[in-house]
Image: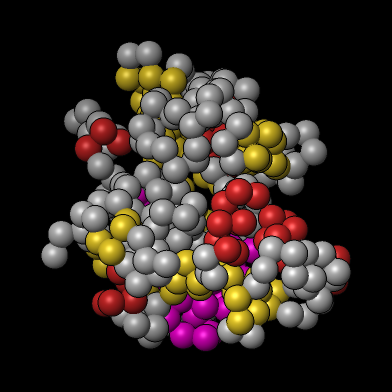
């Protein structure tokens, strides 16, 4: 089946009213919960009956109360054409590891994708599997999915506690130092002209740690191995850029690790591959290694004999 222009069934976004929004208008509450859409857009959605409380349409000026659930029933839309295939790299009763292609989102996000995500495609093959983490849309490689309650909990704990080892291959601008280079630039929200904010290098951000190892010189570029101890959004792209070596073709992050244009994180052009993950197995804690062959531009050259 062709993925191009597939009409999905629409979806529901539920927005419970927190205590801080008690007494606000429905419009103000929605602008707070979904800030990527502007006031004009939300007035249109409210006016067309897409937003409901207790299955009744909600006027824009309707006062909401803490504990109420505001539901936006998004009508069906056509999703962009993306590659939908994936490789099964490891499978047992608790964990499924798959290889994600470039262009396929891991999970819904940004308002464009719902059916065309790795999570949805994986569930067709293994209905009990759920991605335990997210790779950027144009990043390739290993994604771990939990298949059981035990598996999902263990993977979530492993990513949170840093007990899961992650190694990536990246093609970067310039020539980084030969030895392992640590990067600990904090990551947090910074202003962005289209999205309001985007994750980038920020002195007020969350602690983040990576290690960059140059593998090969390729003219004015270098192939690098990147190990990450934390898993912040877009961490490798930002840390390589903050090191002074942005990913080749990255349209968003410049040499200081901050946005250099109005591109958005989902825009492609860079080469980044999750090549290896080692995780403690949920059943007995034994280390399980999963690898995924990189695309040709990221394959290290064979060592000379």
**Residue at x 86%, y 69% (from the top left corner):** 23
Which of the 4 image quarters holds residue 188? top right
Query: Which quarter of the image is occupied by the C terminus?
Result: top left
Q: Nearer the viewer, residue 257 or 107?
A: 107
Residue ID at (24%, 55%): 5
- Residue 182 appears left or right of 292: right
Q: Look at the image and give the residue range highlighted in magenta.
A: 140-161
Q: Is residue 158 inside the magenta stretch? A: yes
Q: Is residue 102 visible?
A: yes
Residue 177 coordinates in the image, percent (x, y): 53, 21
- Is residue 212 visible in the rendered structure shown here? no
- Which residue occupies the extreme top position in the image? 220
Specify whether residue 203 is painted magenta: no
- Where's residue 27, x and y in %? 70, 60
Residue 227 is left or right of residue 87, and the answer is: right
In percent of width and height, residue 83 lies at 24, 54
């Amino acid at each position: 089946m062709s993925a191009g222009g597939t009409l999905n069934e629409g979806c529901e976004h539920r927005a419970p009213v927190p205590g801080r929004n008690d007494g606000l208008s429905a419009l103000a509450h929605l602008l707070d919960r979904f800030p990527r859409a502007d006031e004009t857009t939300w007035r249109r959605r409210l006016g067309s009956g897409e937003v409901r409380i207790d299955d009744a349409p909600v006027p824009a000026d309707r006062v909401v109360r803490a504990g109420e659930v505001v539901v936006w029933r998004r009508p069906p839309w056509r999703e962009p054409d993306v590659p939908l295939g994936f490789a099964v790299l490891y499978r047992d009763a608790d964990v499924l590891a798959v290889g994600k292609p470039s262009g396929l989102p891991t999970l819904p996000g940004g308002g464009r994708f719902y059916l065309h995500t790795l999570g949805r495609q994986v569930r067709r093959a293994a209905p009990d599997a759920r991605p335990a983490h997210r790779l950027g849309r144009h990043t390739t490689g290993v994604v771990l999915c939990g298949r059981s309650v035990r598996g999902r909990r263990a993977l979530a704990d492993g990513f949170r506690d840093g007990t899961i080892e992650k190694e990536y291959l990246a093609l970067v601008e310039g020539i980084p130092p030969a030895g392992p280079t640590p990067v600990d630039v904090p990551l947090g929200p910074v202003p962005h002209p289209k999205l309001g904010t985007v994750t980038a290098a920020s002195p007020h951000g969350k602690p983040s740690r990576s290690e960059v190892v140059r593998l090969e010189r390729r003219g004015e570029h270098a192939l690098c191995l990147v190990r990450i101890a934390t898993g912040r959004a877009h961490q490798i792209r930002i840390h390589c850029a903050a090191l002074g070596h942005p990913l080749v073709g990255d349209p968003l992050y410049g040499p200081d690790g901050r946005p250099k244009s109005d591109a958005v994180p989902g825009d492609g052009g860079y080469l980044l591959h999750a090549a290896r993950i080692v995780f403690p197995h949920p059943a007995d804690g034994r280390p399980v290694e999963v690898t995924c062959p990189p695309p040709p531009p990221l394959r290290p050259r064979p060592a000379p004999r």
